[in-house]
Amino acid sequence: MNHVLAKTLIITNVTELIAQKYSLSLKDARDLLYQSHVINLIEDDETGLYGQSPLYVFSIFESTYRKH
């Protein structure tokens, strides 16, 4: 099953959290998210990550982002 709306919403919300946390434009925050492996987890129906809270997904992004 494809969960396009849920994925779109989680990506939008996580992008906004990244922009706020790191004082980035929405475009730069979105680019950062799409450069991370987290976007692949969101897009993969098997992980179910698209159904989690934006804060949870952001925490996964942030834990990998800090390592760079």
Image (cartoon, rainbow, N blue to C red):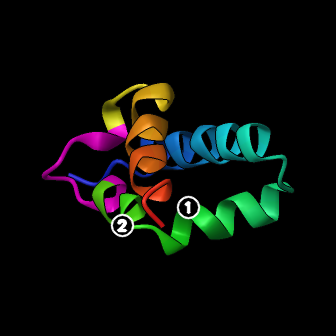
Amino acid type for the residue under numbered disc 1: Leu
Category of crowding for the residue at label 2, using alpha-carbon neighbours closer than 10 angstroms: few (below 14), some (14–19), many (at least 20) = few
Q: Which mark is residue 37?
A: 2
Q: Which mark is residue 61?
A: none
Q: Residue placed at 65% from the left, 48% from the top?
A: 15
Asked whether, in this view, residue 60 is left or right of residue 21, the answer is left
Residue 35 drawn at (x, y percent):
52, 74
- As for residue 48 lying within the magenta part, the answer is yes
Residue 17 drawn at (x, y percent):
67, 37
Which quarter of the figure has residue 6?
A: top left
Asked whether, in this view, residue 47 is left or right of residue 52, the answer is left
Query: Is the residue 13 above or below the residue 39 in the image?
Result: above
Q: Residue placed at 29% from the left, 41% from the top?
A: 49
Category of crowding for the residue at label 1, using alpha-carbon neighbours closer than 10 angstroms: few (below 14), some (14–19), many (at least 20) = many
Q: Which residue is mark 1?
A: 33
Query: From this viewpoint, which residue is outermost toward the left?
Result: 46
Asked whether, in this view, residue 29 is left or right of residue 2, the answer is right
Query: Is the residue 57 above or below the residue 33 in the image?
Result: above
| Start-end of magenta stretch | 42-50
- As for residue 3 lying within the magenta part, the answer is no
Distance CA(mark 2)–CA(mark 1): 8 Å
Which quarter of the figure has residue 24?
A: bottom right
Query: From this viewpoint, which residue is outermost toward the front?
Result: 67
Q: Secondary structure at mark 2?
A: loop
